């Protein structure tokens, strides 16, 4: 394991810093004051800038107009996006495109990947299942009917569902295999219903009722869903890390200026100890996230499958980001809940990231199952 970034990965991070430099985390109404969605769509202007900077095609091969980079580069960019609460489907679209590239057929690759890399086509993934707690692949059934596939079921909390042109839907077959269906928005047999995240973003409940798809729009390669799920989870950990780092910096700036008894409260031992604990959380989140990203990018073997490293990263990310924002709220006092100050927005996003793709407890169970199946020598 080598945590030294390549020149290409560092260049991607620097490009991301430039694109996100002008993004304001409070550019939309506060979720605390908005009963529905804070906006009808993602930040399309920012999406276009990401496309112009070639940051939407990081994981794509050069034949599709991409840079041919890996999960580590994507996580570097996601980390920057979370610091400003960027309202774009960067994780979902990039991960879905990477899965199509790795496991899809040539017809699907040619139709989707060049346009996705240019930002002309948006992809998302239905990864939360029927309730947000059960495995996503069990929420939808897929059966073959001649040359077509027929899908039935419900996927809840689909991120950016109303912005996406294609949703990647995991579904299980009668034989217990998992396939990935590439479902176009508005496809016959599909219905979208509005849902809203804690961050105030518009999600979608996707219902599939005998939705028929051609064979070219279904990926039935072994391991495709597991690989995509691990990439999505690791990317979520990168988002949690970037958000947590920004929140701790905000807290440091505030406590250095806020005075009590004639001294900055940052000089008080109780404040310094709490901030130090959260710094340790962030460093643990960072180390475990890069370990997971490295396993995905390199395919290197380990004592456990890569899913074990992903589970450890998500456990730290889910619990760590919660502790960071809660401590930040505490050290800010009443100012942290002021809707004219952006901290409460970070808290709302952190709660969404904590629970997204499974809370810490779910990944602890998954890790336990892996340890039972692969006892360490």
Image: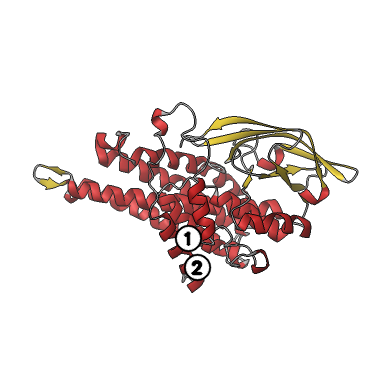
Q: Is residue 185 above or below residue 240?
A: above
Q: Nearer the viewer, residue 153 or 193?
A: 193
* Quadrant housing residue 79: bottom left
Q: How many marks?
A: 2
Q: Residue at x 42, y 53 (%)?
A: 242
Q: Position of residue 51 (x, y in %)?
A: 54, 57
N-terminal label among 1 and 2: 2
Nearer to me, 68 or 157: 68
Identity of the residue drawn at 58% across and 67% down: 67
Q: Residue at x 49, y 48 (%)?
A: 45
**Side (left or right) of 189 relative to 39:** right
The reply to whether dot 1 and dot 2 touch (C-beta < 8 Å) is: yes
Instruction: From the viewer's perspective, tell me whether residue 2 is left or right of residue 375.
Output: left
Separation of residues labelled 1 and 2 (CA atoms): 8 Å
Residue 227: x percent and y percent?
65, 55
Q: Quadrant of the C terminus?
A: bottom right
Regarding residue 309, the answer to whether it shows in the image is: yes
Residue position marked by numbered label 1 in the rendering: 76
Query: At numbered mark 1, what does the secondary structure look like: helix, strand or loop?
Result: helix
In the depicted view, which residue is nearer to us: 142 or 47? 47
Q: Position of residue 224 (x, y in %)?
A: 71, 54
Task: Indicate the secondary structure of the residue bearing disc 2.
Answer: helix
Q: Give how far across and how far down residue 88 sits, in percent.
A: 51, 47
When the figure is inspected, residue 327 is found, relative to residue 80, above or below; the finding is above
User: In the visual, does 90 lie left or right of 210?
Assistant: left
* Tag of residue 34: none
Q: For the view shown, which residue lies furthest in the left direction?
A: 262
Instruction: List the single residue furthest toward the right.
Output: 146
**Whether residue 367 can be seen here:** no
**Category of crowding for the residue at label 1, using alpha-carbon neighbours closer than 10 angstroms: few (below 14), some (14–19), many (at least 20):** many
The residue indicated by pointer 2 is 9
């Amino acid at each position: 394991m080598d945590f030294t970034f390549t020149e290409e990965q560092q260049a991607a991070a620097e490009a991301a810093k430039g694109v996100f430099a002008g993004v304001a985390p409070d550019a939309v109404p506060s979720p605390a004051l908005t009963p529905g969605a804070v906006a009808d769509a993602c930040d399309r202007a920012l999406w276009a800038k990401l496309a112009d900077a070639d940051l939407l095609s990081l994981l794509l091969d050069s034949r599709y107009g991409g840079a041919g980079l890996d999960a580590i580069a994507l996580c570097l960019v996601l980390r920057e996006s979370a610091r400003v609460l960027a309202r774009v489907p960067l994780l979902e679209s990039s991960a879905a495109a990477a899965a199509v590239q790795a496991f899809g057929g040539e017809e699907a690759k040619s139709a989707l990947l060049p346009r996705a890399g240019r930002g002309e086509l948006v992809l998302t993934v239905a990864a939360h299942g029927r309730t947000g707690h059960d495995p996503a692949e069990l929420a939808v059934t897929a059966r073959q009917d001649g040359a077509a596939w027929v899908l039935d079921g419900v996927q809840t909390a689909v991120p950016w569902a109303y912005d996406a042109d294609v949703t990647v839907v995991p579904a299980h077959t009668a034989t217990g295999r998992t396939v990935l269906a590439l479902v176009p928005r508005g496809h016959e047999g599909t219905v979208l219903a509005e849902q809203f995240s804690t961050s105030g973003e518009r999600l979608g409940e996707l219902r599939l009722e005998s939705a028929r798809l051609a064979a070219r729009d279904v990926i039935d390669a072994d391991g495709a869903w597991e690989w995509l799920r691990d990439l999505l989870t690791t990317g979520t950990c990168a988002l949690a890390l970037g958000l947590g780092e920004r929140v701790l910096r905000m807290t440091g700036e505030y406590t250095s200026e806020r005075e009590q008894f004639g001294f900055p409260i940052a000089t008080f031992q109780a404040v310094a100890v709490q901030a130090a604990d959260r710094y340790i959380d962030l460093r643990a989140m960072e180390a475990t996230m890069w370990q997971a990203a490295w396993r995905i990018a390199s395919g290197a073997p380990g004592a456990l499958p890569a899913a074990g490293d992903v589970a450890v990263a998500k456990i730290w990310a889910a619990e760590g980001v919660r502790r960071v924002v809660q401590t930040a709220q505490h050290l800010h006092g009443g100012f942290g809940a002021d809707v004219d100050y952006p901290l409460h927005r970070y808290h709302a996003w952190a709660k969404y990231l904590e629970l997204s793709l499974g809370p810490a407890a779910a990944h602890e169970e998954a890790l336990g199952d892996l340890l039972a199946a692969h006892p360490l020598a």
